[in-house]
Image (spheres, grey):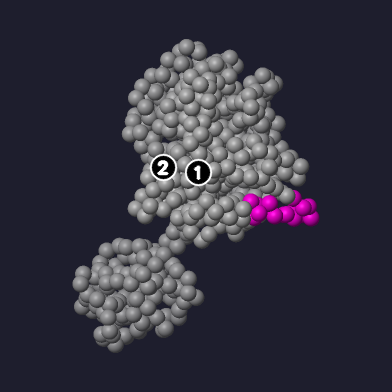
Amino acid sequence: MLRHDDVQEGPAGAEPSGGVPSHMNGAPRLGTVFARSPVAMAVVDTAGRLLAVNPALAVYLGHPEAALVGTMLHDHTAPDDVGRLRTGTVERRLRHARGHDLWAVVSTVPMPEAGEGALLVSLDDATSRRNTERMLLHAALHDSLTNLPNRRLLRDRLDTALSRAQRSGARVGVLFVDLDRFKAVNDTYGHDVGDEVLVSVASGILGALRSNDTVARLGGDEFVIVCEELGSDDDLRRLVDRLLEGVSRPITVHGRKVSVSASVGVAIAGPEADSGDELMRLADLAMLRAKQSMAPTYVVADDSLADDLHGDPGSGRGLLAELRHAIQGDLLQLHYQPVVRVDGRLIGLEALLRWPHPRLGLLLPGDFLPRVEGTELARSLSDWVLRAAVRDAAAWADASVRVSVNMWAEEMSRPGFSETVAMLLTWAGLQASGLYLEMHEQDLPEAGPGLADELDRLRRLGVGLAIDDYGSGGTSLAGMRGLPVDTLKVDRSFVAGCVDDAEDGAVVAAVATAARAAGRHPLATGVENAAQLGVLRRLGYESVQGYLSGAPAPLIDLRDVLASRQVVLPAT
């Protein structure tokens, strides 16, 4: 663990003196400081033997002082961190008497008063910080409701699986699972029951899979499974049969028996290993085709489905071709959700994309945006949404009620993006302060190198900037130091559990504290009830968004809210 030049921890050297070393007896003031210091301290010899310990160290390690003196330093160090001593500061794991690990910042300096080669070791407890970091990392990579991997961790596992497949020639399968008519469960029994159903479904999926498969929850009622070393078509059929059976098993929640089923789309990569994005989009599209059968079933993507995905603009085939037609024909819609202060004062409306599909009904962004990202349609769709939102915001003619628009970070990093925004604002007659542009935290690693420059130009223009879903991507505030953002929108999954789940509550509190310390505004999304609002108010959140303050709706349905500039929120 601790190292001192080339001196090894080894067999006993001199006999331990116990208490304060005799050399320190000649320096009573130093000995008093050692004994009374609240900092855990020890004196060690050249072999790593504890010559003296102070009471604070005894409390820290959970051993009596007398039991510590004479033991070797490595006896109290986690096995993986045992090493050589040297002067300086390091962070290492120690072992408490009860067996659990302690993280400490360990500082070591020569102490000639205690004998030739003696060292004074002091330990500053870092266990709480380490536990918080571990909690935040876990939260950034896992779904808070089911504890399954989230989209970010799934993509990492999928990329790893495809890399291995390139070397081994094995097949990799991606299974996209979507529950059938799950909205009816929430509408009939409430979201609490719906959440318990999702947890049970996650358990059923896990029980159907092999040990080397990965299942992730993307959000809502969508799950994705990555299957490595996928065998024959019969093996796949048996796997999906187990999966559908695991999902559809009856679930009893609060005395109510709830049954759900699922539609599954499958995309298989060969030895040439298709891209992860392509496999995800194909599996998603195969799931939609399975859902059209109106029965729990699965569809394996084939060449015709790949043609449907990309489509021929002239033929009108394919979902992307249909979306291209919808953009060109101005057939998309924007709904808006209020953003309010915790006192109910309206400060903004977030633009949320809707697609009234002629066959599939009203599609939400999650139904089609994953297939658009990374394609040539991404820019066309971004331009349509931005233009429509700026036009609508100009219509309510009050820059104090801003319009918030979600953009792909990759699109915002393209050269000239800020100039495009400036021209749109002039075209619509909207003040720059009336526009907020938001990026999802998970998109930041994919952004181009010009993102910081474009954001800086937008900031100088007067446009507000926000990071959405903060906490879900694991980006530290230090990592965003070069991004001139104004607002951090804490991920809704943490807000959902902030009342009853200690980890979620800690994340929500940490984001608020860290945001304010960095001069940024914390904003909570997904606020659905008064209990959550009460927690957020106590934590110092000034702004919230969610169904408690209003569901997304067409602009015409928000006339009264825009007129009063006020939303009634419950007292907490």
Q: Secondary structure at mark 1?
A: strand
Left or right of residue 337: residue 446 = left
Instruction: State if disc 1 and disc 2 touch (CB < 8 Å).
Output: yes
Q: Is residue 70 above or below residue 249?
A: below
Left or right of residue 303: residue 188 = right
Where is residue 95? Give x, y as percent. Answer: 43, 72
Left or right of residue 166: residue 219 = right
Quarter assignment of residue 92: bottom left
Crowding around mark 2 (Cα neighbors within 10 Å: few <14, some 14 to 19, many 20+) is some
Q: Amino acid at mark 1?
A: Ala
Residue 321's tag is none
Front residue of 170 and 473: 170
Where is residue 505? Give x, y as percent. Answer: 58, 50
Residue depicted at 50% across the width and 13% down the height:
428
- The residue labelled by disc 1 is 267
Q: Earlier in the sequence, mark 2 or mark 1?
A: 1
| Quadrant of the image containing the C terminus | top right
Where is residue 306? Give x, y as percent. Answer: 48, 35
Q: Is residue 428 above or below residue 214?
A: above
Residue depicted at 60% across the width and 32% down the height:
364
Residue 435 highlighted magenta (yes or no): no
Quarter assignment of residue 119: bottom left
Residue depicted at 79% across the width and 55% down the height:
255
- The residue labelled by disc 2 is 274
Q: Amino acid at mark 2?
A: Asp
Q: Is residue 179 visible?
A: yes
Q: Secondary structure at mark 2?
A: loop
Magenta stretch bounds: 244-258
Where is residue 335? Give x, y as percent. Answer: 61, 25
| Quadrant of the image containing the N terminus | bottom left
Q: Is residue 209 above or below residue 174?
A: below
Q: Is residue 28 above or below residue 201?
A: below
